[in-house]
Every structure is written in structure tokens, then in C-alpha cells.
Amino acid sequence: MTSKIGNRPGLIFGIESSCDETACAVVAGGREVLSNVVASQADLHARFGGVVPEIAGRAHLEAINPVIAQALDEADIAPTDVAAVAVANRPGLIGSLLVGLMAAKTLAWVWRVPLIGVNHIHAHAWAPALDDEPIEYPAGALIASGGHTSLYLCRSPNELELLGATIDDAAGEAFDKVAAILKLGYPGGPAIDQAARNGQADAIKFPRSLLKGQSLDFSFSGIKTAVLYHVNGVPGAIRDGVEKGIEHPHGADGLTEKEISDIAAGFQAAVVDVMRTKIKRAVNFARQDRDTDVRTLIVGGGVAANSALRQAVAELGKKLDLDVRIPAMEYCTDNAAMVAGLACNLLSSGKIDDLELSATATVRR
């Protein structure tokens, strides 16, 4: 294969396989996306209402080689043009991570280029810079997806301080579970967003769990349970020694389309309210307790595609005098362009790895 592009500095080949998307991309200079290929597994997991790790791992094995080839072809480059291979090696489903990691190690060894391990969540914080202007630092970042809901203080692309994270369900996971309760299909995020557009957000007042004091952590299990009880009824008390069970067992099948839309809108409003409150707390904490003049607000991850969240963050940014940076829709969900983009910064800082790089399923930093 011959290249028409020639050798360009900072040309990074990225691989992302942390969950259920097999993705490869080529990015130049950290921000110019030359290719961004994503093989989705949504159809494989839809009937389960969520990602099944074993199925995800096997699907990655089948998809990784074709996706690598397609990313190189669409970028119109040869392996000799690549400066480094980057891979999301943490956090995620361990079986899925290993597929991408072994592919990246093989390419780095064969192409004789550096290997760079990338934190998947940190890469989401870089996503707004893809095909766009550079991000101004320091910045506050909310990363919300199916597996993570985290707040960071970002002093640079490579210096991120974790301020808060979910203690139970992630926001995206709550969207999936509530969509399942309402029988709206999978993935739940887009389904809830669509249904909520025809509903009244104030028709049902679901709880907002803000935790104690000025906590920057998240908890979405309570609101998920509140929706479950609203739809299926509250379990009855034991009367005369007999468990009465569910008092209103109508379920989603007994709801009108308008009622489902109102529930979706009320749930979505509650989740967005919590995230907006936590963002404001985090920015105030950074400015006061960390003496850091936060200038930018980054919102990334799959939940960043939610229309209500995007609107709420835009309004909050104006109130807090922040430049709001949200990725283009194609860079909100898991993709390899964000991995390659962040890796360009790591490479320029001399942060590279060797072929003994390991995968880590869970990290809290």
C-alpha cells in the first residue's frame, strides 16, 4: 500500500474496544480526524437490554481486523506514516480491552512505532477538540456514559484530577434501565431523549439524589427505582400475615403514550438537574478550594448527546462565564479518534509504554 498523504508529524493510529464498540481511527496533530471507523454491537445486545461482556469480547475478535484495515484505507495512509499506536487500555470490560490491547501491541511491534496506553475516560475529555478549535485550560469536565459518570478538574489534556464519580449506577446505565422499564428499546439514551420531547418534565417529580453536603459524587440508582415503582406500583405491605405484592401491576403496557412521554421527561429532567448541580459545585470547588481559574466546561461521553443536557450545560456555561465544549455527536459515543487525539499529547510529552502494557478494568483517578 502506498500513501498519498506523506509522512505527517503526530499521525496516530488509535484503537478503542473498552465496551461494545470496535473502533479504529487515524488522527493528525491531535485534532484532525482522517478516519474514524466504528463497528457497533448494539444489535447483538439489544435483546438483553444491556451489554453482555462475553458477547462483546467475541464480537471484538471478529471485527478488529476489518476495522483496522478500513481505518487505514479511509485515511489513505500506509503504516510507515504512523508515528505511534494508541489504545484505550483502561477502564472497561476486561475481555473487550484485551482484544484492542493485543491488536495495538501487534501493530506497534510490526510497524516499529511507540505504543501509548490511554485512559478511556480521559479521552472523552479530549473529544471536543476533534475537528475543532483547541480546548482552553484549565477546564472542568463531566464525563457521562453507560459505565461512568465522573467530574474532573483538567489542568491540561494530560493532567486530570478526579473530583467525583458515581457510587452506583452511571447515568447512561440509568437511561438504559429506565428505557427497559418503559419498553422503549435499547440503547436507552436516544429512546428516552426522543420520548421526552413529547412529555412534560414537571408532570412527575422524581427525586434528585445529591448526597450529603457538597458531595461531588453521583447516585442514580434511586431515581431508577422511583421510575420502576411509578410504573409497576409500590410493593404492598404484609397484611394479616399475607404479602399483597404489587398493588398496581399494570406496568408499561398499561400506560398511554402520553404517560410514557411524561415519565421519560420527568426522569430525564431529574438526571440533568443532578448533573447541572454537580457541575456547578465542581466549578466552585475548583475556583475556591483549588484556587484554579476554570475557563472551560467540557462535557463528554455518550450521555453528552442528550439534548436536554446539552441545553442545560449551555445555559449554565453562560451563568458561570465558561466556554462550553461538547463534542460533535459522532465523538460523544465511544470512538478511537478521541484515543488517538489524546495520545498525540501524551507522545509529545514523552509518555509512551512498552509491550508489557496491561489492561485494567476499573480505575478511580
Image: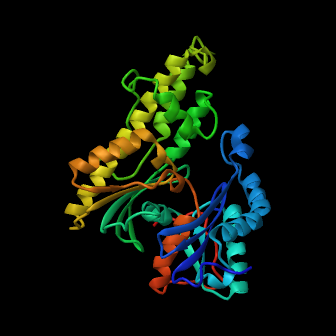
Q: Residue most toward the front?
A: 4
Q: Nearer the viewer, residue 47 or 247?
A: 47
Q: What residue appears at the point 49 percent right and 77 percent down from the top-left corner?
A: 344
Residue 248 x/y as whole percent: 57, 14
Residue 364 visible here: no
The image quarter in which residue 73 lies: bottom right
Instruction: Answer above or below: position of 154 versus 344.
Output: above
Q: What residue appears at the point 22 percent right and 52 percent down from the top-left corner?
A: 320
- For the C terminus, the quadrant is bottom left
Q: How many numbered markers are drawn?
A: 0
Residue 340 x/y as whole percent: 55, 71
Q: Nearer the viewer, residue 302 or 179?
A: 302
Snapshot colouring: rainbow
The image quarter in which residue 133 lies: bottom left
On screen, residue 142 versus residue 46, left or right, reads: left
Residue 306 x/y as whole percent: 46, 42
Residue 335 visible here: yes
Residue 267 x/y as whole percent: 45, 32
On screen, residue 355 versus residue 271, left or right, reads: right
